[in-house]
Amino acid sequence: MGDVTQLLQRARDGDAGARDLLFTRVYGELQKLARQKLARESTLTQLDAPSLVHEAYLRLSHQPDLPGLNRRMFFAYAANVMRSVIVDYVRSRNALRRGGAVEIVTLLTGDQEAVFKDQEIDILDSALHALQRIDGRCHQIVEMRYFAGLTIEEIADVLELSPATVKRDWHKARTFLLEALHA
């Protein structure tokens, strides 16, 4: 897994071949994560897993400077991009409907299902921004777990934390977000 960090560094140094190889390697990993998430937890929105990964990949590949200095930072940024894709998708769908009948978007937390109306996506996005200001690590964990589909163990590996610490932060973040949604 250290080769992602090495490829990031080589790409940052101007090696176009390393950039291409990095995106090939990361794209495959993101596809795998999306398929696992879809099989395990259904869909995030009406987007399917390949569409989510493709849009996130396009956004990542158009970055002039690759984000992150290492694998952990890169995947944290990729999770943020996935969240952005989902929020943009729901906002676009709302703009097209112009106040028509409300559809339900199902978002799964991995432990229990949570159902949100389209308008609540904006509240969730605002709550995530607030969580980021309060506790950046909890915010990263939410993005990696919820939007990128990583398991507790995978997040622990990426963030170089114990699984117990990730579980505590995941619980703390979920509590914060649920309170924000019900406020």
Image: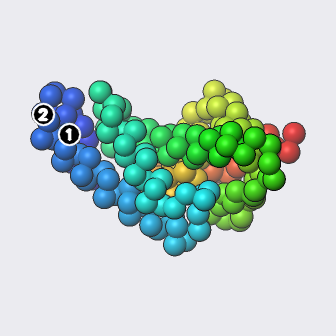
Who is closer to the viewer here, 145 or 53?
53
Residue 176: name its quadrant: top right
From where the camera sits, is residue 1 visible?
yes
Q: Name the kind of residue labelled 2 in the image.
A: Asp
Quick check: 170 above or below 8?
Answer: below
The reply to whether the C-beta atoms of the residues labelled 2 and 1 are less than 8 Å apart is: yes
Q: Which of the image's four quarters has the C terminus?
A: top right
Q: Residue at x 67, y 43 (%)?
A: 96
Quick check: 92 above or below 35?
Answer: above
In x, y percent, where is residue 97? 72, 46
Q: In the shown orientation, is residue 180 left or right of residue 2?
A: right
In x, y percent, where is residue 85? 52, 43
Q: Which mark is residue 19?
A: 1
Q: Residue at x 34, y 57 (%)?
A: 29
From where the camera sits, is residue 138 visible?
no
Residue 164: name its quadrant: bottom right
Quick check: 170 above or below 34?
Answer: above
Q: Which mark is residue 15?
A: 2
* Disc 1 crowd, CA 10 A, few/some/many (<14, 14-19, 20+): many
Q: Residue at x 80, y 43 (%)?
A: 99
In x, y percent, where is residue 53? 42, 53
Circle 2 SS class: loop
